[in-house]
Each structure stands twice: as structure tokens, then as C-alpha cells.
């Protein structure tokens, strides 16, 4: 963790202004409703609409000249692909993104608009990842994992550096977890610079791959169901470097239902006028769930992104007129 922390500090210094410092905003209405001092880390305002641009930018920054010339390959159905495409465009690096055919058309169109070449693969996200890794090996290109890469994790950890600088005396930070790179980076910073702050990891009940691995003490295949939090869905690679990091930095684990995710998305639209994706709703839903334990204390909810298909968002918030 010491080496990772040093890499996060370096990324925090060297990625500006390419990577935005996103605001940590106090939510007056949510604080009143929940009885705690609640802050929103607005990473949905990062370039490409999610935190993924942090890790993508750091990874590409550290490539050799030869690697840059060859180009890179990633696999993604959305946020990671968009982030790699934009970072590549800014640095003059060709980017190819392997995506499942089931990915939302608007997300693939965005990747293309940002300069990325999209290759669609039959099947699910895992099939796209395997195809992308195979193509990278065959073509001699760097494959960029959305989470299983120390340099990507270091980039994500810059969010943690910002949180500590913006509000150094938080009692807890709530982070949604998929592959574990985001929480690993943020948690590494908090353990070093704000040890009193609890790192609370959050999952939808329908997609618990890393949660189940942490509970069991080892990574294994987990059957997941559809979830509004598609940004955290998907399995964890065997041997993923995020697994031991999550074991070290996570203080508490929370599961939330699909109804709780939807309610959180409605709440923040009403209170702070933010449209957020399901994964961001997971973190807020978990904070709502544990609010009775944090009365009068300072907590932050990390809003990891806003990239949600409009029809899906409207369906999620449809039963209340909050817009």
C-alpha cells in the first residue's frame, strides 16, 4: 500500500489540469433529512461523466513512447471506454474498445465520437474483456483493465486526495464497488491521511461479486442479476490486485436493494437537482440506510458518475415527480 500511496500522490500532482478537481458539496436538504452532515463528492462532474477518466488518464500518461505509438485496447460497455477514448484523443494515442453487443447504443456512439474504435462482441461483458485481452496480446498492444491495474487504481485514488483536502475530518466515506479499483484507491489515501474515517463499501444486492469474494476470503464466480447499478456489475478477475487491497482498506460492507437505489436517485434529484447513474445511487442509498448510526457526524457520499440512458433514468424515478 505504501508504493500505491506514493503513486497516487504523484498522479494527484501531475494529472492537472487534464483531470478536474471535482467539488465536495454540502447537501443542506439531505443533511436535514438524514440527521448527519452529508457531503457529496461530485465525481459525476469529471470529464466523460464519471471517475473513470482519472485512472484512464494516469495509465496513458505512464505509457512508453513505443506503447503510445502502437495504441491501446480496452473492454467496456460504457464509462471506462469513454474515459480511455477521451484520454487517448488528448494524448494522440489510438484507442480500441471491445464492447458487448448488448451495450447501450448511446454509450458506444459516445466512445466513437471521442475518437475510439468500437469492436462489438457477442455475449456479455466478460466475453468482451476476454476478446480485448486476446487482441491486445496478438497485436502487441497494452490492454487497459478498468480496475485490475495499479496505475489505473493510482489515478482513481486522486479522488481520495481531493476529499481529504476538501474536508479532512470526515467520519465516513461511502463508495460503490464493482471491480474494486475506485474504493482501493480512495481507501488507500484515507488509511494514510485520515485514519479515523471509515471506508464504507456499497453494493447492489443483485451484483455482489467483490462483496461475496470478501465474505468468502477468495474470488469465485458469482451469479449476478440485472441491476440499475450497471456500472458496478460484472465479475472479478481471478487474481485481481484489487482483492487484497479491498481487504485492507474497507471497514464496512453494505448491500442495498433496487428500490433503495431508485429512492436515492429520486432523493438527490429533489434535493440537489443532480441526475446520477445507478452506481452513484448505491452509495447514497447505503448512506441513507446507515444514517441513524451517523447522527450529527460528517459523512461523504461519492457520486461516481451520471452516465445513464435517459429512458432508464426516467423509469427509475417515474413514480414521483421530482424533476
Image: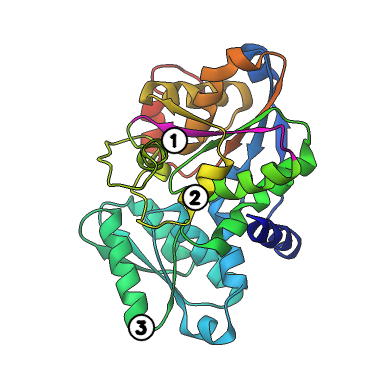
Q: Residue 101, image x and y in percent?
A: 25, 57
Depth order, front residue of 133/211? 211
Residue beneath disc 2 = 244
CA gap between label 2 and label 3 equals 31 Å
Q: Secondary structure beneath disc 2?
A: helix
Depth order, front residue of 268/181? 181
CA gap between label 1 and label 3 equals 35 Å
Q: Quadrant of residue 25?
A: top right
Q: Secondary structure beneath disc 3?
A: helix
Q: Residue at x 28, y 36 (%)?
A: 226
- As drawn, the residue found furthest toward the left would be 122
In reply to whether residue 208 is colored magenta, the answer given is no
Tell me whether circle 1 and circle 2 mark residues in contact (CB < 8 Å): no
Mark 2 or mark 3, earlier in chain: 3
Q: Residue at x 25, y 60 (%)?
A: 127
Q: Residue 123, image x and y in percent?
A: 21, 56
Q: Residue at x 52, y 59 (%)?
A: 83
Q: Quadrant of residue 295?
A: top right
Mark 1 or mark 3, earlier in chain: 3
Q: Which residues are magenta?
A: 194-205
Residue 274 drawn above or below residue 231: above
CA gap between label 1 and label 2 equals 26 Å
Residue beneath disc 1 = 278
Labelled disc at residue 322: none
Q: Left or right: where does residue 141 sit relative to residue 267?
A: left
Residue beneath disc 3 = 139
Quarter in which the N terminus is drawn: bottom right
Q: Left or right: where does residue 270 sit relative to residue 223?
A: right
Amino acid at each position: 500500500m505504501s508504493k500505491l500511496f506514493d503513486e497516487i500522490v504523484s498522479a494527484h500532482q501531475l494529472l492537472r489540469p487534464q483531470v478536474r478537481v471535482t467539488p465536495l458539496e454540502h447537501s443542506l436538504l439531505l443533511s436535514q433529512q438524514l440527521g448527519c452532515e452529508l457531503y457529496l463528492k461530485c465525481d459525476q462532474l469529471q470529464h466523460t461523466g464519471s471517475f473513470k477518466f482519472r485512472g484512464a488518464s494516469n495509465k496513458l500518461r505512464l505509457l512508453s513512447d513505443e506503447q503510445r505509438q502502437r495504441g491501446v485496447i480496452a473492454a467496456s460497455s460504457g464509462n471506462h471506454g469513454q474515459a480511455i477514448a477521451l484520454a487517448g484523443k488528448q494524448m494522440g494515442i489510438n484507442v480500441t474498445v471491445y464492447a458487448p453487443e448488448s451495450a447501450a447504443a448511446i454509450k458506444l456512439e459516445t466512445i466513437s465520437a471521442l475518437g475510439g474504435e468500437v469492436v462489438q462482441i457477442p455475449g456479455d461483458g466478460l466475453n468482451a474483456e476476454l476478446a480485448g485481452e486476446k487482441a491486445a496480446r496478438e497485436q502487441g498492444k497494452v490492454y487497459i483493465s478498468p480496475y485490475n491495474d495499479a496505475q489505473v487504481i493510482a489515478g482513481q485514488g486522486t479522488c481520495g486526495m481531493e476529499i481529504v483536502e476538501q474536508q479532512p475530518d470526515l467520519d465516513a466515506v461511502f463508495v460503490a464497488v464493482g471491480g474494486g479499483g475506485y474504493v482501493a484507491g480512495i481507501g488507500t489515501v484515507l488509511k494514510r491521511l485520515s485514519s479515523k474515517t471509515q471506508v464504507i463499501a456499497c453494493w447492489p444486492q443483485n451484483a455482489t461479486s467483490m462483496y461475496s469474494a470478501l465474505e468468502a476470503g477468495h474470488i469465485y464466480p458469482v451469479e449476478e442479476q440485472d441491476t440499475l447499478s450497471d456500472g458496478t456489475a460484472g465479475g472479478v478477475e481471478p487474481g485481481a490486485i484489487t482483492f487484497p487491497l479491498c481487504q485492507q482498506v474497507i471497514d464496512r460492507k453494505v448491500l442495498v436493494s433496487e428500490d433503495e437505489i431508485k429512492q436515492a436517485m429520486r432523493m438527490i434529484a429533489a434535493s440537489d437537482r443532480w441526475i446520477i447513474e445507478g452506481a452513484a445511487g448505491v452509495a447514497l442509498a447505503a448512506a441513507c440506510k446507515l444514517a441513524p448510526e451517523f447522527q450529527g457526524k460528517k459523512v461523504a457520499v461519492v457520486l461516481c458518475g451520471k452516465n445513464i440512458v435517459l429512458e432508464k433514468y426516467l423509469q427509475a424515478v417515474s413514480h414521483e415527480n421530482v424533476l
